[in-house]
Amino acid sequence: MKKILYSWSGGKDSAMALYKLLKENTYEVASLLTVVTKDYGRISMHGVREELLELQASSLGLNLEKVFITKDSGNEEYELCMKEMLGRYKKLGVEAVAFGDIFLEELKKYRQERLGQVGMQAVFPIWKRDARELSNEFIDLGFKTIVTCVDSKMLDKRFCGRVFDRQFLSELPASVDPCGENGEFHSFAYDGPIFKKPIPFSIGETVLRDHRYYYTDILTSAAA
C-alpha cells in the first residue's frame, strides 16, 4: 500500500476527502499535514487553535505533522518550509500528498507542480464533485462542523460561528459556493464517521480581522 501525506485543514472538505481516501483503502496515511501560523498558534486561514487540531488528530488516530509559518509570511517562506518537510517524508517512502480541493484549477496545477519538484504526486479524492451534492452527503454521513471564519466581502457576520447544516445551506446567497471553495468561509469538523469520538469545544467571541475576515473563536474545554 502506497504511503501518503494528507493535507489537513481541519475543515469539512478536508474531512470529507479524508473519508473518501480512507474508504478507498488504496493508501496508508503516514501523517496529517497542517500549516500553522506560529505567531497565533492557530491553523492558517481557519483560525482554529492548535490544541483543537491536536485533538482532531488524536480522535482520527493519525499522526500529525505541523508546518509553521509566520503571520506575515509570503509564498517563499511557505514553499521553503514545505519543500524541506516533503523531502523528509520522501526519504521515508511517502509518494504523494492528498488534498480536499474541489474545482480550483490553478490551485490544483500549483500543487502538482510543487510536488513534482520533489518527485511526489498530488491526489484529489473529491475533485470535480458537485458542491451542493457533496455538502448534503457530508451532512447525511453524520459529519458535524462549525463555521469559524467568513469573508465579509462575500458573507454576513451572522454566518460565522454557526453549525454547517441544511439550514445554513438554505440561507447562503446564490453567489456563494455551498462548500466555500472560493474562500467564502472556513470551518472546524468536530464529529463524524472518521472520528473515534467528538471533539469537545465551546464557542467564543467573534472578531473582525484585517478589516475583512470574521473569526469565531472555538475554545477547548480547558480554555472555555
Image (spheres, rainbow, N blue to C red):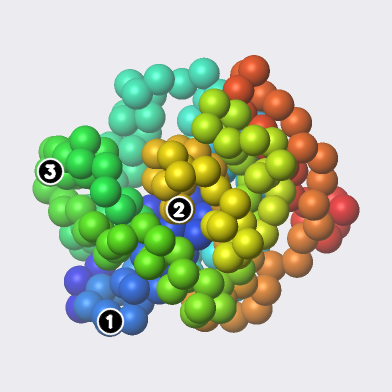
Q: Mark 3 vs mark 2: which is more N-terminal?
A: 3
Query: Residue 41 appears in which quarter of the rendering?
Result: top right
Q: CA distance from mark 1 to mark 3?
A: 24 Å
Of the residues tagged 1 and 2, which is closer to the observer?
2
Q: Position of residue 63 (x, y in %)?
A: 47, 64
Q: Which residue is mark 2?
A: 178
Tag of residue 90? none
> Where does the image place residue 57, in percent across and percent down from the top left?
55, 64
Q: Which residue is mark 3?
A: 116
x, y (%) of residue 166? Answer: 58, 65
Can residue 44 be seen here?
Answer: no
Q: Amino acid at mark 2?
A: Pro
Count of numbered marks? 3
Q: Are marks 1 and 3 in contact (CB under 8 Å)?
A: no
Indicate the amino acid at tag 3: Gly
Q: Which residue is mark 1?
A: 25
Question: For the residue labelled by badge 2, is the local secondary structure a helix, a strand or a loop?
Answer: loop
Q: Local crowd at mark 3 within 10 Å, few (<14), some, or many (≥20)? A: few
**Can you say whether 45 is above or below 34 in the image?**
above
Q: Quadrant of residue 175?
A: top left
- For disc 1, the neighbor class at 10 Å (few under 14, some 14 to 19, many from 20) is few
Whether residue 194 appears in this view of the structure is yes
Of callouts 1 and 3, the N-terminal one? 1
CA–CA distance in space, label 1 to label 2: 28 Å
